[in-house]
Amino acid sequence: MDRIMIVEDDIKIANHLSAYIEKYGYEVIVAKEFENIIDLFRNVRPHLLLLDINLPSYDGYYWCRQVRKESICPVIFISARTGDMDQVMALENGGDDFITKPFHPDIVMAKIRSHLRRAYGEYAAKFEERMLIHNGLSLYPERLELRFGKKVAQLTKRESDIIESLFERYPRVAGRQDLLEKLWDDQAYVDENTLNVNITRVRKKFSELGIEDAIETVRGAGYRLRITWNGEER
């Protein structure tokens, strides 16, 4: 069942949309708090996001940018803003479509179905799925999954990119600067501590699979994949 996530601070509109969409057999998750939308997104992993612009704390443009760091799921903005620049901003910040309020729910449903078909269904681009394998580990970059045996760890886009770099560089070291440039090529400056945080998260994903000490820190250089079985490095 496809999951639709709604981020709309007008509870009447959110509930109206939710009830209407559910009638068509979709699972709907409505955001109740707006301080950290990205955490809810990670937990829900929706197939499509309906996103308002005017929100408490941060606006919809901000949250769309955060989503785009981790997912390519369709994002449809729904807003009372009607200016051309608002629609331009929505698309420039990672949105796929824009619906103005007031709207007819049938229009919303038509756009939802259209974007789901293009992203996952009959109109989706056909390509051979990539899979990287290393010593029993399988990385699926398009699924954002790391598998080991029957265990599966769900990844963010950046976690997947880090693991892919480690796979590709093994047994060489993946340099810190190389990782920074690959993961944040759209930013002029990134605090290196941000990379440390992401490496820590990747280590936790390996731990979820029962693999400890999978990433070796090479002082002054970067990181290297280091997986051992029965005391032997692989």
Image (tube, helix red, strand yellow):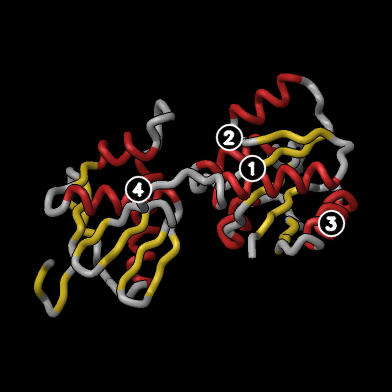
Which residue type does callout 1 highlight?
Answer: Val
Which residue type does callout 2 highlight?
Answer: Gly
The disc, 1 or 2, on the residue closer to the chain's N-terminal end is 1
Tell me the residue at 58%/34% (across/down): 94
Answer left or right for 218 relative to 17: left
Q: How much space separates mark 1 and mark 4, taking CA atoms?
A: 22 Å
Tell me, for residue 94, which label it has, or none: 2
Q: Position of residue 113 (x, y in %)?
A: 69, 49
Q: Nearer the viewer, residue 189 or 93?
A: 93
The disc, 1 or 3, on the residue closer to the chain's N-terminal end is 3
Q: Which residue is mark 4?
A: 161
Relative to 33, is 115 above or below?
above
Answer left or right for 219 relative to 55: left
Which residue type does callout 4 highlight?
Answer: Asp
Which is in the foreground here, disc 3 or disc 4? 3
Res 182 → quadrant: top left
Which residue type does callout 3 highlight?
Answer: Tyr
Q: Nearer the viewer, residue 123 or 162?
A: 123
Task: Indicate the secondary structure of the residue bearing disc 2.
Answer: loop
Q: Position of residue 71 (x, y in %)?
A: 51, 48
Q: Which residue is mark 1?
A: 75
Tell me the residue at 57%/58% (across/down): 45
Mark 2: few, some, or many residues within 10 Å (few <14, many ≥20)?
Answer: many
Tell me, for residue 20, which label it has, or none: 3
The disc, 2 or 3, on the residue closer to the chain's N-terminal end is 3
Task: Give yes or no for contact between labels 1 and 2 (Cβ–Cβ under 8 Å).
Answer: yes
Which is in the foreground here, disc 1 or disc 4? 1
The disc, 2 or 4, on the residue closer to the chain's N-terminal end is 2
